[in-house]
Amino acid sequence: MCWSATADLAAGTVVAAIGVACTARARRARELPLAALPLLLGAHQIVEAAVWRAGGGSGPATLAWAVISLPLLPVWVPLGVLAASPPGGRRRLAAPAATGVVTAAALAYCLATRPVTAEIRGRTVGYVLDLPYAPLLIAGYLVATVGALLLAPDRLLRLLGAVVAAGAVLCLLMWRLEFVSTWCAFAAAASALLLVRAVRTAP
């Protein structure tokens, strides 16, 4: 994943198919946002294939990728985990959800007021957006996405959180300038654990 347009397209198609399978197995409406997460992440990788083919830049594909990655995911993940959790396990998820809403609002404002560009850097894509208070926004983003999974009552969701957290550290160490792109690809692949969860919880 992330190594070329072809790799992103193939990975995105597989992950999106996993999302379709997860969504089809969802037992209740409140589980649909979480079940559809691989579908969103798969679409995200397919959009990045379009960024590759455009040679980077600041076109529609770059903006679409940034909208999914930046303001959408930090809201989608914690609220999806919150909705899918039993009532007794939701209180501890309030903090990641609130953090996600605030972080997403700040990131959406940045996208609306500042240009975002993509740069092809060897075998990865780097996205450039001038973020004020970047360390704080990154911390809020990780609390919302990884934190919600780690605090989930469901054991498989906690495992997914641990895998994604380890992937974040690895991607940051190996591809610092392309962290967002490589971590999102890793998270997309790791979301296959949601299919395992869907199969185990299906009636």
Image: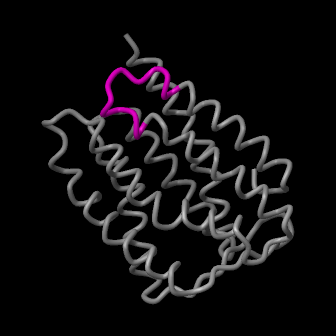
Instruction: Give the position of the C terminus as an image quadrant.
Output: top left
Question: Which residue ends up furthest to the top in the rendered image?
Answer: 203
Q: Name the residue rendered at 63%, 63% in the picture.
A: 65
Specify the segment rendered in magenta: 22-34
In the rendered image, residue 181 lying in the magenta stretch gets the answer no
Q: Name the residue rendered at 86%, 70% in the picture.
A: 55
Whole-percent x, y for residue 120 in the image: 82, 72
State left or right for residue 124 relative to residue 198: right
Depth order, front residue of 76/99: 76
In the rendered image, residue 30 lying in the magenta stretch gets the answer yes
Number of marks in picture: 0
Depth order, front residue of 66/94: 66
- What secondary structure is the magenta-colored segment mainly? helix
Q: Is residue 130 above or below residue 167?
A: below
Q: Quadrant of residue 69?
A: bottom right
Q: Name the residue rendered at 15%, 48% in the picture.
A: 91
Depth order, front residue of 124/41: 41
Colouring mode (rainbow / by chain / secondary structure / one colour): one colour
Whole-percent x, y for residue 142 in the image: 42, 64
Whole-percent x, y for residue 33 in the image: 40, 40
State left or right for residue 174 relative to residue 187: right
Q: Name the residue rendered at 30%, 36% in the picture.
A: 84
Q: Is residue 118 above or below residue 101?
A: below
State left or right for residue 202 relative to residue 82: right
